[in-house]
Structure formats: structure tokens, C-alpha cells
Amino acid sequence: MASAYIAWYLFFAGAGASAFAIASVVDFALRLSSRPNLLKISPITDIGMVLGPIMVAVGCVFLLLDLGDPSIAFNVFLRPSSLLGFGSWAIFLFWLFAVASLAFGLMPHCRASKLVEPLLQLLAAILSIIVILYSGVFYSLFPSVPFLNTPLVPALFTASAFSSGAGLLVVVGFFRQTCEGVLEGMNGLSAIDVAIVLVEVILLTALLARPALFPESDASLSSSALLFGGLSLLFWAGVIVVGCVIPLAVDLTCLAHPRPTVLCIGGISALVGGVCLRFCILMAASRFAIGFVAAQPFWV
């Protein structure tokens, strides 16, 4: 179904695109109204404007490694009507618009830059959501892989992407503590992360409980492998404890008394948990090639 490169692509592209989306939402909201709660987190969310295209570009490197032959990527671009072609164009245009909006933002303020920069940022923000969604949608459309053949997969990957994106911003914010307002921004973002992690837990529970309705199916075997089988250690330790319990505990603990080091630990845990989640979900599915050489490239 996919190589391990794809799990890394899903992580980097999801975390980067969500970091950019979070930054864009906060930026556009502040253009309309200078709300105190948004002003608190803006010093840290602004980092997402830069990190977004960088992380997505790193994710694309893993896609190319999965392909092995760059000509396949070129052929995908020639089929924009397909889901993979649509997704590849979304990645390219997101990166293009995101970098262009940054360039216009650095230009001396003039009437043209004030009009063009928010338009490019809006287009990039829309495309960032597509980048987050499309890989999960692609995997959910395989009837031959029952465990992934459900709308819960793109929903779970989306929630995990935003949790990873928020964790990424918090970790980077930790190294920018000398900047004014960064600590308040880290704490404000962790408060939002509470809701994201809870949604992620609900979706993950629904995904694992769904095969119980069809106990003899391959989906049930995949779910059992995660809960009780060979993948259980990675799932319970990496996804549940590191990816959900620790970030949630950190977020709730730091609501009243924010501590940079503790917040950073929570952010790192969210990132590690995001990686573990993608490996667990794909490894539990049928035909997943765990090796670093793909049995069947993602794009084909």
C-alpha cells in the first residue's frame, strides 16, 4: 500500500500545513479585530507562516523518495482530474502562494503589497486545508483495505495534523522566549490544543471500535493488531501515552501556571505521537510495506 516514506510525508506535510493554517486564521482574525486572546498567541502562531512551506517541502522529499523515479511525479501532474493529480497540484500551489505571500509581506508597505499579500495568504490557507485532507481521503477510498476505508481516517489525520502543528509552534516558541509575548502565546495555543487532542481521541476510539461490528473482517484484525497484537506497544506507548495523555496533561496543568519547559515537553510529545499514529495506522492496514523501499509507490 505504501512505504514508510509515506508515513513521514503525512507527518511533515500535515504538521506544516496545519501550522500555516493556524497562523493564517489568527492573522486574518486580527485584521478584523484586535482581540486580546488572539494578540496573546499571535507572536507564536506567526512562526507558522515560515514553518509551513518548509515542512511541506520536506514532506515532498519523502514523496519523491517513495517514487524512486521523478518521471512518475511528472505524469501525476499531467492528470489533474485524478485525486492524486489534484493533491499534487494543491501541494505545489500551496508552497508557491505561501512563499509568495511571505515575499510580499517583507516588501516595503505599499498599496499593491497590502492587497496582494493577504490574497496570496488566503489562497495558501485554503490550499493548506486541502493538503491536510487529501492524503487521508485518498487512503479512505480503498475498498480492498477495510481498516482505512472510512471517513474517520481523513478526520483523524486532520485532527492529528492540527495537534502536531500546534505542538510544532509551541516547541519553536520555546526557543524564542526572549521575544515579547511568546510565553503567553505558548500557553494560549496549548489551551486550544486541549480541544484538538480530545477530538483526536474520540476519532481514534471510533476508528478502532468500528471493526467490532464486523468481527471477521480484515479491519477487525488491524484493530486487534493495534490494541493487543504486535503493534500494541507502539500504539499504547507512542500514540496513547506520548501522543495524547502527556500533551493533554501538560495543557491542563499549564492553564493556570504556564511553564515553558513543561509546555515544550508537551509539544514534543504531540510531534512524536503524530509520527507514531501515522506509522501505526498504516502498519495496521493490509499490504503496508514496513521497509524503507516501497512495494507499491503511493502515487501509482
Image (spheres, rainbow, N blue to C red):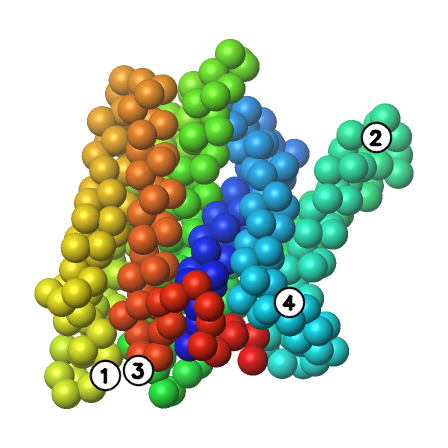
Q: Name the residue under label 3.
A: 146
Q: Which tag, 1 or 3, sits closer to the chain's start?
A: 3
The answer to which of 27 and 239 lies nearer the viewer is 239
Q: Quadrant of the C terminus?
A: bottom right
- For the residues bearing labels 3 and 4, Cβ distance under 8 angstroms: no
Q: Do the residues labelled 2 and 3 touch (CB within 8 Å)?
A: no
* Type of the residue with mark 4: Ser
Q: Which mark is in front, 2 or 3? A: 3
Labels 1 & 3 near each other (Cβ < 8 A): yes
How busy is the neighbourhood of tag 3: few (under 14 within 10 Å), some, or many (20 plus)? some
Secondary structure under tag 2 reads loop
State the residue at coordinates (58%, 32%).
Answer: 46
- In the image, residue 206 lies at what x, y percent? 23, 67
Image point (62%, 50%), residue name:
57
In percent of the image, x 18 and y 78: which residue is there? Answer: 221
The reply, left or right, for residue 81 in relation to residue 198 is right
**Precedes in sequence: disc 4 or disc 2:** 4
Between the C-alphas of marks 1 and 3, the distance is: 6 Å
Instruction: Find disc 1 in the rendering and name its residue.
Output: 218
